[in-house]
Image (cartoon, helix red, strand yellow):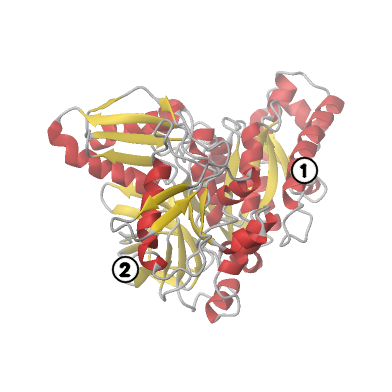
Amino acid sequence: PEHIRNIAIAAHVDHGKTTLTDNLLAGAGMISDDTAGQQLAMDTEEDEQERGITIDAANVSMTHEYDEQNHLINLIDTPGHVDFGGDVTRAMRAVDGALVVVDAVEGAMPQTETVLRQALREGVKPALFINKVDRLISELQEGPEEMQQRLMGVIADVNELIRGMTEEMDDIDDDWTVSVEEGTVGFGSALYKWGVSMPSMQRTGMDFADIMELEQNDERQELHERTPLSDVVLDMVCEHFPNPVDAQPRRVPRIWRGDAESELADTMRMVNEDGEVVFMVTDISMDPHAGEIATGRVFSGTLEKGQELYVSGTAGKNRIQSVGLFMGSEREEVDRVPAGNIASVTGLRDAIAGSTVSSVEMTPFESIEHISEPVITKSVEAQNMDDLPKLIETLQQVAKEDPTIQIEINEDTGEHLISGQGELHLEVITQRIRDNQGIPVITGEPIVVFREQPQEASREVEGQSPNRHNKFYITVEPMAQDIVDAIQLGEVSMDMPELERREALQEAGMDKDTSQNVEHIHRTNILIDDTKGIQHLNETMELVLEGLQEALDDGPLAAEPVQGS
């Protein structure tokens, strides 16, 4: 495990992640050097190639020799478009390092900030690659001075973001900001396949003056040969990103709330391949031949074909039918995948993105918190009634593969509502239902999803039981925004031990007595049980919660979900 690196490449849309990945694959000898940069090997779906954007996170494993030692690099190429941010969040759970790519001309953009936040929230260490430096030389005709100032400006912006986000994190002792001197910043052009960093300049003797000269004289092939991008980036990955043995002791307490003293916690911290199997599923994809493929991180133990494993939240066991590693669009089957790797397995039919799969029953990992909620809804109907069962099955599969999509099947009207992160998100999903599943569908106009919220405390409302012997009194009032934020960020949930939940709520501003009486949290709404000394309340509590959930899902104003009450 000391020679494994699990990394994600993340950036704002069109800053060159997939093109950069092509270079790395070519450097590792997996695709031809000539087509790297144009081939976009990690955009495996037709619609990704057509649109020229990455839609699904794609995994690939490669080897790289560094310091006379072969390293295995498991890489995830993530989408940059804001609609597919869920893939980035899920990828960050599986990796220990994030290579953030920034366009030298555009600088740090809104999505750069988002992907950095997603990485740091999962305890993933960042490094920076500034791409498209060739544009500064050829398009903007910048001299060495201006260019240096611009690049230093980009690094300063990124560091400011990192500093702002790591200040509150207790488990990060080191300074995670990136620096040219330390070698955690690389520069280059993914399209023309050259790159430099401080260590590579010392190794090859190339400096910015030489690069500018070769770039201005259009001698890009020579530039690529003298300082190939893949060597620079892969050396940086091997040298500066933590291996699983360094990373897991820090990451496991962050994403798992089980008993830190237990043997299981020990095997995860030590990345013990002989321990119990613990596998966290971060991605579900469909393969027409193999069926459902679950990809994720092996925290301990060794995955092998034929193992029977528990899937958190479901009864019984699932049997692994095959174990493999992803190579872009191809899946390479292997006999076993030991701890510290990113593996893909078939046979886990009960798993969804976010499931914990293990050989013993255990406390599951924290659910993967997606920063954004669905904002756009479309109706989807099958053109032919015969396709209806197939459409329902496909929609359920979509919801399983992509947790940032919400599917609502309305049995009264026969209309199916699909909500996602944006219009492009829904367009891609419906196009794939048409093309991949061959189901002709009619979609309605996209509508924006609204939320309702009480504006002030209500009067007390009385409800009676059918036999008139019992009365309930309920009031509703708006909740402080800090508490709503804490629930949305996953800092407060009903899965937490009660003491921790109380402390978190008090930190967010709830008073002590109220925090002790929290009965239930539904979305961002909290039910407080203020009753005293009542018998048999537990027997009816389930019915109270059911009624409450119905009322909150279907608000009184416009039948939209209620939040913050």
Q: Nearer the viewer, residue 10 or 282?
A: 282
The residue to which callout 1 is attached is 159
Mark 1 or 2, nearer chain start: 1
Q: Is residue 170 left or right of residue 464?
A: right
How crowded is the residue under tag 2: few (<14 C-alpha within 10 Å), some, or many (20+)? few
The residue to which callout 2 is attached is 315
Q: Position of residue 344 (x, y in %)?
A: 41, 58
Label ID, residue 205: none
Instruction: Tell me what residue is drawn at x 63 percent, y 43 percent.
Output: 481
Amino acid type at circle 2 is Ala
Q: Is residue 335 visible?
A: no
Amino acid type at circle 1 is Asn
Q: Position of residue 272 (x, y in %)?
A: 54, 75
Q: Nearer the viewer, residue 41 or 317?
A: 317
Q: Nearer the viewer, residue 131 or 410?
A: 410
The answer to whether residue 167 is above or below residue 404 is below
Q: Position of residue 562 (x, y in %)?
A: 47, 40
